[in-house]
Image (cartoon, rainbow, N blue to C red):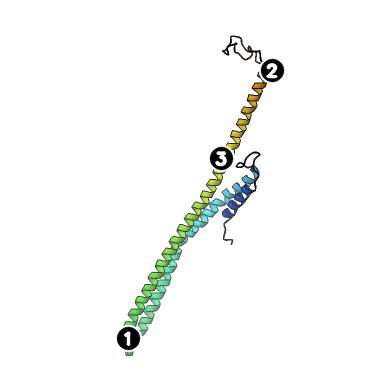
Amino acid sequence: MNNNSRIEQIIEEIEEYIDSCKYQPLSNTKIVVNKEEMEVLLRELRMKTPDEIKRYQKIISNKEAILNDAKEKAQAIIADATIHTNELINEHEIMQQAYAQANEIVMTATKQAQEILDNATLDANNIRLSAIQYTDEMLGSLEAIINQSMNTSVNKFNNYIDSLKQCSTIIEENRRELNPNDTAETGTNENGEPGDKELNII
């Protein structure tokens, strides 16, 4: 399995695609985006996001499994130490030494078991924090891409409205040039005030 998730690959593809887009004429910031290609990438990103989140939820849920495994190892160490202790105690010729060694073994085994539990707890917490951080960064990248797409759409719409307004102004000026003395049709008198004559609208 690749180290990079499919979501990371899709985000990289989107970034590469955006970098490859051409700038709009007379602009150094606005680019021309192929809507269909962007929608394909975003559609796959939406489909993969739930699976990726489930993947990291599974990693987080493995915390209990890690702790249980650590407990089993600790119990096995203590059991082995207890068996060895009993063997030493049963040897009458070294009874006193057996007690000393038994206590030392039990203390060592208990210390090792505690270290295993502590390390397992630390590892599980680190895995959980890493998974949460990664998921947050992934969602943050997705949010940035969506916001960028929204801003691009808004800018395109505003540019379209501005173009229509300019065309309307030019048309209005051309009509005034064609009829410079025809104030009746514009509904104003010589003083620029509304006149009484009604317009004939075709």
Mark 3 residue type: Asn
Q: Residue at x 36, y 81 (%)?
A: 85
Residue 151: which numbered mark, if any? 3
Residue 34 lies left or right of residue 8; in this view the side is right
Count the numbered circles shown.
3
Q: Nearer the viewer, residue 195 or 139?
A: 195
Which of the two discs, 1 and 3, sits closer to the camera? Answer: 3
Mark positioned earlier in the residue sequence (1 or 2): 1
Mark positioned earlier in the residue sequence (1 or 3): 1
Mark positioned earlier in the residue sequence (3 or 2): 3
Give the SS element for disc 2: helix
Label pair 1/2, CB-CB below 8 angstroms: no
Residue at the outermost right position: 178
Residue 178: which numbered mark, if any? 2
Give the SS element for disc 3: helix
Give the SS element for disc 1: helix
Residue 97: which numbered mark, if any? 1
The image position of residue 160, as x and y in percent, is 62, 33
Which of the two discs, 3 and 2, sits closer to the camera? Answer: 2
Q: Residue at x 65, y 25 (%)?
A: 170
- Whole-number angstrom distance, CA of label 1 to CA of label 2: 121 Å
Q: Is residue 115 above or below residue 97?
A: above
The image position of residue 145, as x and y in percent, is 56, 46
Mark 1 crowd level (few <14, some 14–19, many ≥20, 10 Å Cα): some
Q: Nearer the viewer, residue 19 or 75?
A: 19
